[in-house]
Amino acid sequence: MERGLLWLPLLVAFFWLAWQGAKEYQKVEAYRVWAENFDRAKYDIYAVMGQKEQKITWGKPTPQGPNNLATFSLLDVKEIRLLVDDKVVATESPPEKGRTIELEFLFSTSTESVRVPFTEIPLAAKWGKYLQGVLPSLELPHHE
């Protein structure tokens, strides 16, 4: 009887871990289906983000698929900044550690910004470098 009581917490922990794993697997599968519509996409526990031509769509991953989706055009973005612990850092030489990692998109038409969270600094820096490289090519040529 005592042995059974000793194993009960382990059995509960096992089932809880299995349930959490199944839930995370559902999130990843829902993301995989969602990401097929994009040229480039990222998934982590904080946010999903996809790029299709000059449009960026991002939201929160759930087992049913991404929700709270928001879309904006890169044509409206004037600057992309990498923030680590709410401080702007260079994408070429980011710090190795940080508690909060975000890409911030500043718009030319408003004072509002969009902050997309990331779990890893190198991934956020890679996305930041890529999108900063895309911005100049999106500008329309000036005709005089």
Image (tube, grey):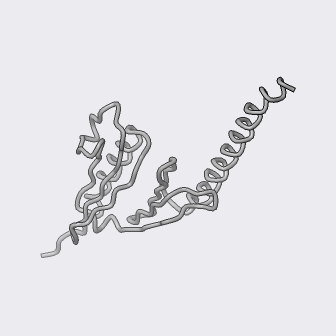
Q: Where is residue 16? Give x, y as percent.
A: 70, 42
Position above or below: 40 against 144: above
Question: Which residue is farthest right?
Answer: 1
Q: Where is residue 13? Give x, y as percent.
A: 70, 36
76 left or right of 11 in image: left
Q: Nearer the viewer, residue 125 or 20?
A: 20
**Residue depicted at x 16% and y 74%:** 143
Question: Which residue is farthest top?
Answer: 3
132 left or right of 64 in image: left
Q: Quadrant of residue 77?
A: bottom left
**Residue depicted at x 63% and y 57%:** 63
Q: Where is residue 142? Give x, y as percent.
A: 17, 71
8 left or right of 118 in image: right
Location of the N terminus by quadrant is top right
Total marks placed: 0
Q: Nearer the viewer, residue 18 or 90?
A: 18
Position above or below: 91 against 105: above
Position above or below: 25 against 12: below
Location of the C terminus by quadrant is bottom left
Question: Which residue is farthest bottom?
Answer: 144
Question: Which residue is farthest front?
Answer: 2
**Residue depicted at x 36% and y 44%:** 101
**Residue depicted at x 58% and y 59%:** 36
Position above or below: 75 against 102: below
Q: Nearer the viewer, residue 2 or 31?
A: 2
Q: Where is residue 45? Give x, y as percent.
A: 51, 47
